[in-house]
Image: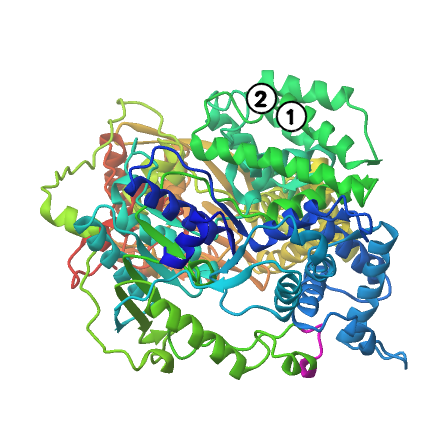
Amino acid sequence: MNAALLAALDAGATIVTPNRRLARALHRDFDLVQRGRDARAWPTPTILPYPQWLRWLWDETAAEPDNEAAVLLTPAQSALQWRQVVEADAQHMALFDGRGAAALAEEAWTLLHQWGVGGESWRAWASSEGVLDDPAVFARWAESYGARLRAADACDLALVPDLLARRAGWIAARLAPTVFAGFIEPTPQQGRLVAAFRGAGIELRHEDTLSELQASAWRTTAATPQEEIAAALAWARQRAATSFDARIGIVIGDLVARRDEVVTLATDILSPAAALPGATKRVPFEISLGPPLGAVPVVAAALDLIALLDGSLEIGRTAALLRSPYLAGAQSRWSARARAESEWIREGKREATLIDAIRALDRCSPELAARWRTFHDTRRAQRTASPREWSDAWRAWLVAAGWPGERTLDSAEYQARLAWERLLLEFVSLGAVAPRLSSAQALSTLQALAGEQRFQPEGGPAPIQILGVLEASGLGFDALWVAGLDAERWPSAPSPNPLIPLAWQRQHHMPHATAAREREYAEALTARFARASLEVVFSSAAMIDDHPSSPSALILGYPEREAPAHRSVWAAMTRTATLESILDECAPPLDAGARAPGGAQIVVKQSDCPFQAFARYRLGARPWSLPADGLTPPERGRLVHAAFARFWSAVRDSRTLTFLDEGALSEHIGDAVERALGELPPPRWRALPALLRDGEARRLAQLLRAWLKIERGRAAFAVDAVEAPALLQLAAVEFSLKLDRIDRLTDGGIAILDYKTGPVERPRQWFEARPRSAQLGMYMLAQLELEARRPVRVVGYAELRPEAASAVGIAADAGAWPGLDGVEAAPGGSWTGLEAWWRSRLEALAEEIRAGHAAVAPRLNPSPCRNCGLQPLCRIESIRAMAPEDANDG
């Protein structure tokens, strides 16, 4: 704190700052000075952010006899008024985002008063010819908003400075000497207020918050924006390690857009131990621009509960709510609660209602389900109510729902809950401008308030402060790094408000109006940063979004140095530590004679990757289901199998098929399709558009017709069985199988068909060291064990794809199925050799399953990892990352 400010505070002056962070910093600096003077107690200084100072002055003038507007709207009340103005006009306009338009209009209103001359300039922008451009629309909104203020005998914060200027004489006797501290450039409106106060005899002046330092400023360049932030954090870590009580600042120009990335990097570099189980959440840094209050988990749970009360939520959010630790009984049967989302996805739901959530809780948390059901059945539904009534109803529901849980909240969670209570009070205050709100209006308003309010938990002062540009302006540090000063982003590109004519903005020299204006502003900020600390580093990135970049011209005058070296803290820890390595590729073996789970598929997956077979069929692991637009692939496959099974159960043989006329064929196809569609329960079809059911019926009929055309070109046959169960013993393990179809050939022998609704592998791809399409070999061996006297002469797929149907397989001779690959494609070039090859390979795979072989060893080409979905369990990507760079991972 510089001497002038300290003297002013000692004399009892009021300090006004441009933002809350600077006010807190000056409070802290003043306290440190008092401790340095060995003082044990001292009066709390009056240091207020500018908006709070205006409100304080307004309250002081409330008793003035000529008070023009007794009610000062809160920001929330003002924002709601703007939204109502815009929404009332939206019926005549094709507005894509009414809420965004209202925010722009409110910003334009504030800028207009800050940078105008105090009049109603917008009236000149109104259109007189019926053609509405953006400023003309704003003029209409401003008139409507002003009329609302007058009707309510109210004003907002944008009007207060000019109203206070008119009452300077009344205020003069009540106002202590005042200092404006840390303002980069006062607005014309502030200038009018200061002039009026001085004219009334009030002592008011501007002071800088920064002391005159002999700063050492230099610049550096990093390879990428991420490397730049990492270098700044490593530099800050080093400074903090050498000086425990140092105040270190890192300023990032685009912090809002990069906040999540910066938090992740800061945690890894500044507090790597925070990621360890059981570690404290305390970290040595504080980051400004906290997340929206509505995104804080404990508050997000409350908002989702309220949204679920009278509406619906996307199933992912509903399932996350059921798993939330902020519900009663959160620790009981957590995994069972987690299954609700998977079940909803299988049912094809996109959104869930409160009733859906209660039904899900019935299966896993009946006590909580009963509480929810009781509240749902006994509550009195409200279509419209006052904000206070909505608040009371929401509080009652949250209590009934068991929010915020049974465990003790930590400090940040407790502060978030207090912020939630303040948010509800702010919502209740909206009753002054919106006496009645519908359910949808109340919820959207509450969500908007929670989204606009930033949450930053209070704690002890952290040595490292990560700030945005405006938050850091005026603060002093012991060491400061300013990042993101490349030519593309510093100065920033102009961003004028679209609702104010550009000519007006240029005339009044408004911020962000022109490139020249942005340059002036950036120059002023750069100069302030250069003297905000004894050591200042300006940095930029050499590459941004895969194209080269250069430092801003505003920092080229500073000497350049090489970026400080840094490396990953985790990498340093792993390189210096002795890590234990355990090779564990063996699961518990199966008992002799045991039945293997998964049937033929466990053998198929064992051939693809032993670990995948073990994880899927012995651990029961499944990749997480994803919502599908329409029917899921398994559902489509189920319908195809059902339609084909029904058709051949009725038609039975090729002779009957040949003599069916078009009418009879269509009748059989229609019956098969209709019965197949009945495989999915009615609630599933009700969740889908009616057109989709009709389209699926046509698709099934087309697939049947396309395949029957192929069947008519075959040698004569009769369908012996569809969906036929069978057992196969391999390596003392029993496998339960289901054969899609077994045909008896008229000239002797058996044909085995497996229906596939996706692309299949051709016979030349089957016979590798680890076989592909292993289920066909298992079906053949099972059939031979069942009827050894009847040879299997055909084994293959019915490839049923929307674009085409085809038969893919091997026939023992040309007469068995013309057009299929001959037996010469099989190992040994004979059918006997094919049977022996299948038996030896499948016995080996069955032995691996029996012995518990579960190595993470996917086949190389094609890799099954693409469609596996179990990588979080096997962690194969971690294994590949640790392998030598020249290793071939396939």
| Residue placed under numbered mark 1 in the picture | 359
Residue 500 forms part of the magenta stretch: yes
838 to the left or right of 185: left
Contact (CB < 8 A) between labels 1 and 2? yes
Camera-nearest residue between 615 and 567: 567
512 to the left or right of 218: right
Give the x, y percent position of residue 687.
71, 42
Camera-nearest residue between 837 and 858: 858
Camera-nearest residue between 737 and 320: 320
In the depicted structure, whether residue 639 falls above or below residue 478: above
Residue 302 forms part of the magenta stretch: no
Q: Residues within 10 Å of mark 1 (few under 14, many from 20)?
A: some
Quadrant containing the C terminus is bottom left
| Residue placed under numbered mark 2 in the picture | 363
Amino acid carrying label 2: it is Arg
Quadrant containing the N terminus is bottom left
Give the x, y percent position of residue 152.
85, 49
Give the x, y percent position of residue 209.
41, 60
Q: Which residue is rendered at x = 80% and y = 74% of the image? A: 136
User: Residues in magenta?
Assistant: 498-503
44 to the left or right of 587: right
Residue 814: tell me if it is visible: no
Q: Which residue is rendered at x = 31% and y = 70% of the image? A: 538
Question: What kind of secondary structure does the magenta stretch mostly adopt?
Answer: loop
SS class, disc 2: helix
SS class, disc 1: helix
In the depicted structure, whether residue 195 falls above or below residue 579: below
